[in-house]
Every structure is written in C-alpha cells, then in structure tokens.
Image (spheres, grey):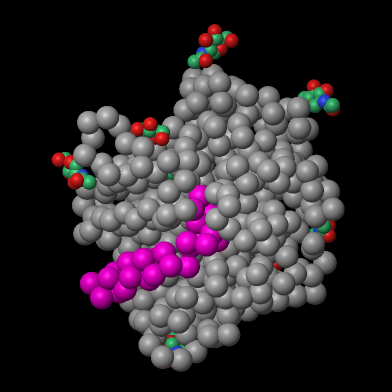
Amino acid sequence: MFSSLLGSLALLVPLTFAQSSANTSYAPTDAYRLGPSNAACTLQTYNVTVTSNNTVFTNVNSYANETYLTAVWQTFLATFPYGDNFTEGYTTGYQEVTNTYAIAGTLCTPLSGANTTGVQILLHGIGFDSSYWDFTADGTNTYSYVYSAAAAGHSTFRYDRLGTGLSEKPTDGYNVVQKSTDIAIAAKLAEMLREGGAIVGSPTGGYDKVVMVGHSYGSLTAQGVTVLSPSAVDGALLTGYSANSTAVPLFFAASGFASASVVMPDRYNAAEVSNSYLVTVGAWNNQLLYWYFPYYDSALYNYARAFEQPATQGVLLTLGYNITAAPAFTGAVSVISGAYDFPFCQANCYAVPAGSNFTNTLEGVQALYPAASSFSTYVVPDAGHVWHLQYSGPTAYQEMIQFAERVFAA
Ligand SMILES: *[C@@H]1O[C@H](CO)[C@@H](O)[C@H](O)[C@H]1NC(C)=O
Ligand SMILES: *[C@@H]1O[C@H](CO)[C@@H](O)[C@H](O)[C@H]1NC(C)=O
Ligand SMILES: *[C@@H]1O[C@H](CO)[C@@H](O)[C@H](O)[C@H]1NC(C)=O
Ligand SMILES: *[C@@H]1O[C@H](CO)[C@@H](O)[C@H](O)[C@H]1NC(C)=O
Ligand SMILES: *[C@@H]1O[C@H](CO)[C@@H](O)[C@H](O)[C@H]1NC(C)=O
Ligand SMILES: *[C@@H]1O[C@H](CO)[C@@H](O)[C@H](O)[C@H]1NC(C)=O
Ligand SMILES: *[C@@H]1O[C@H](CO)[C@@H](O)[C@H](O)[C@H]1NC(C)=O
Ligand SMILES: *[C@@H]1O[C@H](CO)[C@@H](O)[C@H](O)[C@H]1NC(C)=O
Ligand SMILES: CC(=O)N[C@H]1CO[C@H](CO)[C@@H](O)[C@@H]1O
C-alpha cells in the first residue's frame, strides 16, 4: 500500500518571521495574519517526509530560458492529452522519490461556541497560497472561509502547497515539485491531523474525522489522495473542479505561463525560485482563467494578481496524470464549482453531452467514485473558477460547511 510508505517522521520547525518578511513574494499581511478573530490559530512549519511515485522528466532544466519552456508547452499541447511525442521526448517513466519538505500550515480552532471533533484540511489551487482560504484583501472576513467555518464551530487546517507561500521552494520544479509529491504531502498531513499531537493545536487524541477540501489543483490533489490513500480522509469536497478536461488545453494556452522571476522580477528572483516556477504572464490572463466579470470586488482581484503565487512546470505538466477512479474510497464526495468556471467547464458548467442524464458538468465526477457513501454537486451562480472570492461565494460556503457536518455526523 502506498499509504504505508508514508509513515515517517514529521517534525516541528518554529517559523522565523524575520526571514519570511525579507521575501516580498509572500504577502506580508498574510504572513502576519494568524487567522480571523473568531478562531485560535497556530502557524507552524512542519518537516513532512513522504515517498511518492514521481514522473521522471528528461530534456528539461529548472534554469531553462523562456524560449525553451515555451517549446516544452508547445510539444505538450500538440500532443494533449499526453501524446506519444511528449512522453517520448520529455519523460522516461516513474521513480519513487523520498524527501522531507518544509510545509507551512495554519490550524484554526473556534474560540467559542460549538467545536467539532472533525477537521477540514484545505488545499488551495494554482496562483495562490493558503491565504486563499482566509482572504481579507477587502479588509473584512466576508471572503474568509476559515472565518465562516470557525463561526460554524469547525476547525480548519490550511497549508501552503510545496513551492508557494512560506513552504519550501525546491529548485527542481520537475522531478521533485509535481503532482505525485503533492498528493503524498496532502495524504501525510491528513494522517497527521488524525493522529494526536502531530499538528500543533490539535486535540490530544487527534481528530476523529478528516474532510479534505480542495480548490482546483487542490481538488486534483485531493482526488489523487482518494485513489492512493483512500483511508486518509472521510470526505472529499472538490471545489473549482470537474472531470471534464475539454478546456485544459485552452487553460494552458490562455495562461501564458512563464517564469515568475521574469514576469514579476520585483517579487521573485532566481535565487528564491528557479525558472521552472511559473505565473500567468499578465493580469488579464489571470482574469480570463479564474474570474467571472463583473461579479467580484476588484480589490480582491487586484490583490490576488499582486501576490500571485507560482506553480512549477512539473506540477502543470503532471496535473492530469493519475486521474483514475477511486474504487476503494467509501467516504462522501461533493463537487462545488462556479457556473462559469473556465478551466474545468470551458465557462459553462451546465454543458452536458447530448443524451446524457447529467444536469451539470460536475456530475461526471461520480463515475470516479463507485463506492462513495454519497455524492452531490452544487453549481455556484454568477461565479468563475475562484468562486470562493466572488460575490456569490460566501453564501455557497454554507454548502461546504453542511457537507463537512454530514461527514462529521456519519
Ligand atoms: C527540519 O528540516 C530542516 C532542513 O533539513 C532542518 O534544518 C531542521 O533542523 C528540521 N527541523 C527539525 C525540528 O528537525
Ligand atoms: C510506483 O509505480 C509502480 C509501477 O506502477 C508500482 O509498482 C509501485 O508500487 C509504485 N510505488 C508507489 C510508492 O506507489
Ligand atoms: C500513474 O500512472 C502510471 C501509468 O498508469 C503508473 O505507472 C504509476 O504508478 C501511477 N502513479 C501513481 C503515483 O500511482
Ligand atoms: C534559450 O535556450 C535554448 C536551449 O538551451 C538555446 O538554444 C537558446 O539560444 C536560448 N535563447 C536565449 C535567448 O538565450
Ligand atoms: C510525433 O512527431 C513526429 C515527427 O515530428 C510526427 O511525424 C508524428 O506525427 C508526431 N506524433 C504525434 C502523436 O504527434
Ligand atoms: C476546540 O478544540 C480545540 C482542540 O481540542 C481546543 O484547543 C479549543 O480550546 C476548543 N475550543 C472551544 C471553544 O472549546
Ligand atoms: C465537457 O465539456 C464540454 C465543454 O463545455 C462539453 O461540450 C461536454 O459536453 C462536456 N462533457 C461531459 C462528459 O461533461
Ligand atoms: C445517470 O445514470 C447513471 C446510470 O443509470 C446513474 O448511475 C447516475 O446516477 C445518473 N445520474 C444522474 C445525475 O441522474
Ligand atoms: C525576493 C527575495 O527577497 N527573495 C529572497 C527570499 O528568501 C530567500 C532565502 O532567504 C532568498 O534567497 C531570496 O533572495
């Protein structure tokens, strides 16, 4: 079993604020925000040791120039999904990789009122770090899911994906920072939440239920956890997600993904992140992929762009790998996406194949979960991919909380 290989040490590392404040790539307000006023939050960096079955890349270089990176995209998109030429030219199979990664995570428990014995682990998507879940660019808690969850008595654990925020940024953005590694880290952290004492601030005996909540690539990762480590979580809440890959080539083409240190030289330098760490090339590319105009506060969009976080080319090239059914996953599954989600619905989550009994694109995910205890979908009106940050998001947070409560009560 893959999950048995994950059973290694996870040690605490005290976070040094002085070091992080030197880095403008991490929004300073987020670095110092230890969660909303209705929760007690602990930010810690954990040494997480995992073994993962990684795609082995060849003919790539973490310090390649933009011309070369673009040529890789061209080959990839010419043969999508993962045609022979890309596989033959750039990958040579799989190899187990064991490493220890410094991952920054924040556990928030409600300060008063109800206090669930379960926890939600929150996996953000590409372009963000874990501040996505506690987003306060408008100066309020309106778009903080951490706040809404705490108000409902729920504990949350959000962490910065490898290569983002305050987490480690390994140089090798291909063989190391890729989807398999992210799946293993997510599974390991979920297991740590279930164990007592592993996560600072968690109950002595650990949490009795773990709901994994993803957004976008975080949902692709969570789906991988349900395949490879099905007992790690009791529920999978996949947001900003579908099983429809029609728009994926458009997503890549419209992003203009290029090196963070080239696109945003005032925030990133090659000493901090290698060239393989990419951001969208322009603010409007970011809008095209993620936001549905005009249903959002431009202050949130401006902040999201100003502090856009990178994803490695290895993550982006492997995000479609190993999307297979999870026949061993017996927990609950729900999919919640914005009606106009671009990457996962090509801007219309009501498009379904002729003759199908689906009422929306998200229902296609059910085929991956033959043994799930329950399956549901919800389409968030007037919202795009980052629906949590759009005007209709906060109302839909209640759908997420209700799902978690059903899992906690089961
Ligand atoms: C975590 O890992 C880093 C890098 O290897 C190391 O310097 C640090 O001592 C470790 N922390 C603990 C608590 O072992
Ligand atoms: C990696 O993949 C190979 C081939 O599919 C498999 O034999 C092996 O068990 C996998 N290892 C892990 C850690 O999943
Ligand atoms: C991913 O899929 C490939 C091809 O089916 C397989 O060999 C590999 O073991 C899978 N990796 C993981 C981590 O399951
Ligand atoms: C970019 O890298 C490629 C491959 O190494 C090289 O052929 C090309 O000359 C480089 N271009 C520039 C502008 O440095
Ligand atoms: C791979 O490249 C060769 C040579 O350029 C071309 O003839 C072939 O059609 C390509 N195959 C695919 C699947 O794109
Ligand atoms: C909720 O549970 C956590 C973990 O056991 C504990 O630290 C916290 O004080 C509790 N909060 C309330 C309001 O009971
Ligand atoms: C996938 O999305 C495309 C584009 O929106 C749509 O035409 C197609 O019907 C969808 N297929 C499924 C199986 O949902
Ligand atoms: C569609 O039909 C399939 C096969 O009969 C069934 O398993 C599935 O639950 C149906 N989906 C919806 C949304 O009715
Ligand atoms: C932009 C910036 O200041 N980056 C720095 C972040 O921290 C690392 C490690 O301390 C430095 O190497 C970077 O130069």
Please say whether residue 120 is one of the residues in the magenta stretch. Answer: no
Above or below for 376 versus 90: below
Say left or right for 312 vs 406. Answer: right
Q: Residue furthest right?
A: 266
- Which image quarter has ligand 8? top left
Q: Nearer the viewer, residue 30 or 229?
A: 30
Residue at x-position 23% and y-position 58%: 374
Q: Nearer the viewer, residue 108 or 307?
A: 307
- Please identify the quarter of the rendering in which residue 137 is found: bottom right
- Residue 111 picture location, percent across and down: 49, 89
> How many tags in the picture?
0
Assign the magenta stretch its main secondary structure. helix
Residue at x-position 33% and y-position 63%: 235
Please say whether residue 389 is one of the residues in the magenta stretch. Answer: yes
Q: Residue furthest bottom?
A: 112
- Residue 234 picture location, percent across and down: 31, 65
- Please identify the quarter of the rendering in which residue 131 is found: bottom right
Residue at x-position 38% and y-position 66%: 400
- Residue 132 picture location, percent across and down: 58, 63
Say left or right for 194 vs 370. Answer: right
**Is residue 79 something that shows in the picture?**
yes
Q: Which quadrant would the C terminus be assigned to in this image?
A: bottom left
Residue at x-position 56% and y-position 26%: 77
Magenta part of the chain? 383-410
- Residue 288 picture location, percent across and down: 60, 42
